Amino acid sequence: MSTKNFDIQPVAGRIGAEIVGVDLSTNLSNDIISEIRKTLVQYKVIFFRRQQLDANGQVAFARRFGEVTTAHPTVPSLPGHPEVLDLDYGRTATRANNWHTDVTFVDRPPLGSILRTIVIPPAGGDTIWANTVSAYQDLPRHLRSLADQLWAVHSNAFDYAVAAVDLPTDVKAYRDVFTSTVYETLHPVVRIHPESGERGLFIGGFVRQVRGLSTTESDDIIRLLQSYVTRPENTVRWRWQVGDVALWDNRATQHYAIADYGDQPRHVQRVTISGDIPVSIDGKHSEAIKGDSSAYTPTLVTA
């Protein structure tokens, strides 16, 4: 498939496409950016092979899709680049090998994330994305009806009684930084995509508890819904090469960075695009419970 400006090569049946014929280091026209955005909404995650971008170019590309956040609500940015989260998995970052949607613990999670590869192991270190819209569509009718009614608290706080036992010192230190300010937000379990109007499951690794349910009930229901997200049919796996860039719709995906490369270096950098407040199927908005994220996410200005 192709547009008038580039070719589109789907990577999997329900999610993911490679865009061929676009050089992200150039001054792309508004027309091309519009076509890229439409492709993103359709395929949920899009890939660009072997690009020649630096940190400044990555931020400039991200700005074509909206305001850009600071690197992270709690984790320091790349020195000299307040918008860039430097993820050097051989040295300073804990590995994100759990299913999650980026920064859902704030009331305005990112619209999307852009990841650029700098160092990649010769084998291993792939990333998997899941389509949360097709996961919702796969639910039996009764489960969809249940999910439509649920709200869940998302937080960056870990359950240290469970998660921090026997962790390496560097991982504990990183988690101390990650949770230096605790955020909690109440989000709908099913959100309406603001561009496509599609319904998708909005859960993932930062969910702590479904409102109104016990911990056991909540865990069981989230585990059941999450099992639909991570079905192989709803996923795409990308084998990175140095210079690759991935742009994913954070409103309709989860992702998992596979930690199968031992002590080999893996170095990537991420920039996130400011999003809006999620909306439930009955028009209600997410609510911040704890933590002020205004320094992380610029407020969107409308005319």
Image: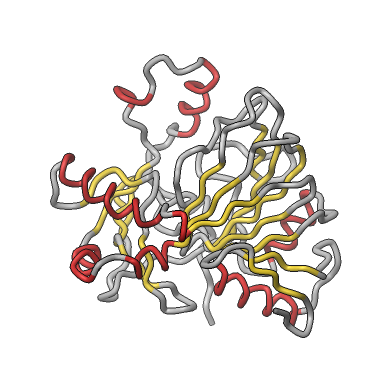
Q: What's the residue at 39%, 44% (across, down)?
A: 205
Q: Give residue 186's position: percent from left, percent from top.
A: 29, 55
Q: Give residue 83's position: percent from left, percent from top.
A: 65, 49
Front one among 170 and 200: 200
Q: What's the residue at 46%, 52% (across, down)?
A: 101
In the displayed structure, 122 sits above or below 256; it is above
Front one among 203 and 260: 260
Asked whether, in this view, residue 112 is left or right of residue 134, the answer is right
Front one among 69 and 160: 160
Point out the image quarter for the N terminus.
bottom right
Most extreme residue toward the bottom, as rendered? 4
Q: Quadrant of residue 62?
A: bottom right
In the displayed structure, 94 sits above or below 132; it is above
Q: Quadrant of residue 50?
A: bottom right
Colouring style: secondary structure
Q: Give residue 88's position: percent from left, percent from top.
A: 67, 33
Asked whether, in this view, residue 103 is left or right of residue 209, the answer is right
Q: What's the residue at 35%, 66% (across, down)?
A: 136
Point out the image quarter for the C terminus.
bottom right
